[in-house]
Amino acid sequence: MTKKERAAEIMRLLWEEYPEAECQLNYSAPHELLIATRLSAQCTDKRVNMVTPALFDRYRSVDEFAEADVNDVAEYIKSCGLYKTKAADIVSMCQKLRDDFNGIVPDNMEELLSLSGVGRKTANLILGDIYKKPAVVADTHVIRISGLLGLCDSKDAFKVEMQLKKLLLPEFSNDFCHRIVLHGRAVCIARTPKCEMCVLNKVCKSAPKM
């Protein structure tokens, strides 16, 4: 089985195991996903989802975030960690959205990366989830599990993104990443992987021989 064939089989097995492949961050507008993803850096999605309802109720639009006091925003997101930096990024990114992009979240990598606090992981999530474009979100789960599966040979996020792009069907690449995250939380747990119950154990390069 070639690496590309193994990737296709992994996608098929994950599809069967996790039919609903969705982002775990709660949002109702593109700018809210952008902000929630910024908050998720070094913070769990669960914690972010606890914080954002009050935040998004207080600031209901890009314009309101752009006009917000950074210290006030920081008060809402304190429990997410690095809250002062994140608050400054949120206000700054929304100011740029308002001033340079008519309040619309961009649909291309270059312009997304021009926003404060936005890296390739965040940009790919926006491209995939909001604009339904082929995208690979190389987060910690994707990097770790892709390496265990033998699909990638690097721990560098950009290199993993590029390697997976060569292996995955473009139309399924974003869903693949969501399913890998679900699998990493439920089964392929970093410290205590449940290999004996893993649907991928027969195609995983790191699974113990059963």
Image: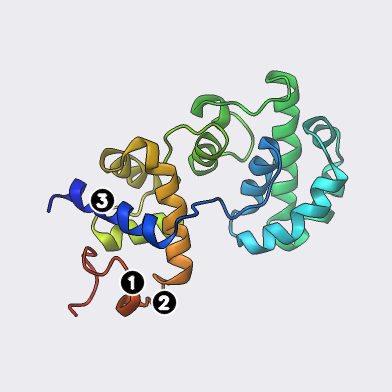
Residue at numbered disc 1: 198
Dot placed on the residue nearer the N-terminal end, 2 or 3 = 3
Q: Examine the rendering and report whether any part of residue 95 can be seen.
A: yes
> Looking at the rendering, which quadrant does residue 76 occupy?
bottom right
> Looking at the rendering, which quadrant does residue 179 occupy?
bottom left
Q: In front: mark 2 or mark 1? A: 1
| Element at label 2 | loop
| Element at label 3 | helix
Q: Residue 180 carries which label?
A: none
Query: Residue at coordinates 63% horizontally, 53% vertically from top-left?
Result: 25
Q: Nearer the viewer, residue 5 or 122?
A: 5
Residue at numbered disc 2: 191
CB under 8 Å between callouts 3 and 1? no
Dot placed on the residue nearer the N-terminal end, 2 or 1 = 2
Q: Which amino acid is tagged 1? A: Cys
Q: Around disc 2, counting alpha carbons within 10 Å, would you say few (fewer than 14), some (14 to 19), or many (20 or more)?
A: few
Q: Which amino acid is tagged 3? A: Ala
* 186 over 25 or under it: above or below: below
Q: Around disc 3, counting alpha carbons within 10 Å, would you say few (fewer than 14), some (14 to 19), or many (20 or more)?
A: many
Q: Which mark is residue 7?
A: 3
Q: Around disc 1, counting alpha carbons within 10 Å, would you say few (fewer than 14), some (14 to 19), or many (20 or more)?
A: some
The location of residue 28, given as percent across then percent down, is: 71, 42
| Element at label 1 | loop
Q: Is residue 132 left or right of residue 83?
A: left
The location of residue 181, given as percent across then percent down, is: 46, 59
Distance, label 2 to label 1, CA atoms, is 15 Å
Distance, label 2 to label 3, CA atoms, is 24 Å
